[in-house]
Image (cartoon, rainbow, N blue to C red):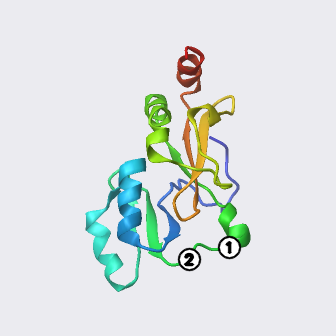
């Protein structure tokens, strides 16, 4: 962990990321089926008046807030939602990639061989069905490297 300067925000953790989709319920099902994120029931009432439908993989400590509407264009689309997982979970996700039909930002199919070795982490990149970019990453680099090397 690095030091922060005086007056800087300290102890911050990811709360949520805004993602725009044309249909929140359809998107929530995709996020559940592909990424294992469930609707945070205690916040589901926010969606009633045009607010977000929040999905999370950790019970709501952090999440993705699904807003209905068009995804921002231009530089806004370069923001990536990065999800951290354990090494075993990344390997399981890579093993099941083809059944989800994931594509990259150019529309090309994403395959397990597309995983990127960053040295101290491994990541796979793709977009959701609405063009929002995602990264699934694991810092269990030695485990992932040893298992991928065995293939």
Give residue 133's position: percent from left, percent from top.
60, 57
The residue furthest top is 150
Quarter-of-image position of residue 78: bottom right
The residue furthest left is 41
Residue nearest the viewer, comparing 135 with 120: 135
20, above or below 143, in the image: below
In-image side of 6 versus 103 (left or right):
right
Quarter-of-image position of residue 142: top right
The residue furthest bottom is 49
84, above or below 45, in the image: above
- Residue for point 60% across, 38% down: 123
Residue nearest the viewer, comparing 60 with 79: 79
Give residue 30's position: percent from left, percent from top.
40, 57
Give residue 53's position: percent from left, percent from top.
37, 70
Dots 1, 2 in contact, CB < 8 A: yes
Give residue 22's position: percent from left, percent from top.
47, 74
- Residue for point 68% across, 69% down: 76
Residue nearest the viewer, comparing 32 with 118: 32
Q: Residues within 10 Å of mark 1 (few under 14, many from 20)?
A: few
Q: Residues within 10 Å of mark 2 (few under 14, many from 20)?
A: few
Numbered mark located on residue 145 in the image: none
Structural distance between the alpha carbons of marks 1 and 2: 9 Å
- Residue for point 66% across, 65% down: 77
Kindly identify which residue carries mark 1. 73
Q: Identify the element where label 2 is drawn.
A: loop
Residue nearest the viewer, comparing 17 with 92: 92
Kindly identify which residue carries mark 2. 70
Q: For the C terminus, which image quadrant? A: top right
52, above or below 5, in the image: below
């Amino acid at each position: 962990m690095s030091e922060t300067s005086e007056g800087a925000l300290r102890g911050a953790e990811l709360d949520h990321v805004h993602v725009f989709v044309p249909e929140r319920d359809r998107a929530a099902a995709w996020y559940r089926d592909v990424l294992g994120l469930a609707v945070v029931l205690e916040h589901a009432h926010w969606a009633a008046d045009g607010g977000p439908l929040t999905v999370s993989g950790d019970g709501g400590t952090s999440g993705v807030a699904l807003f209905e509407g068009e995804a921002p264009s231009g530089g806004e689309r370069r923001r990536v939602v990065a999800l951290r997982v354990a090494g075993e979970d990344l390997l399981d996700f890579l093993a099941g990639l083809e059944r989800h039909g994931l594509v990259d930002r150019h529309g090309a199919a994403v395959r397990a061989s597309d995983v990127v070795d960053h040295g101290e982490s491994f990541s796979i990149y793709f977009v959701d069905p609405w063009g929002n970019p995602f990264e699934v990453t694991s810092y269990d680099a030695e485990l992932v490297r040893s298992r991928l090397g065995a293939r």
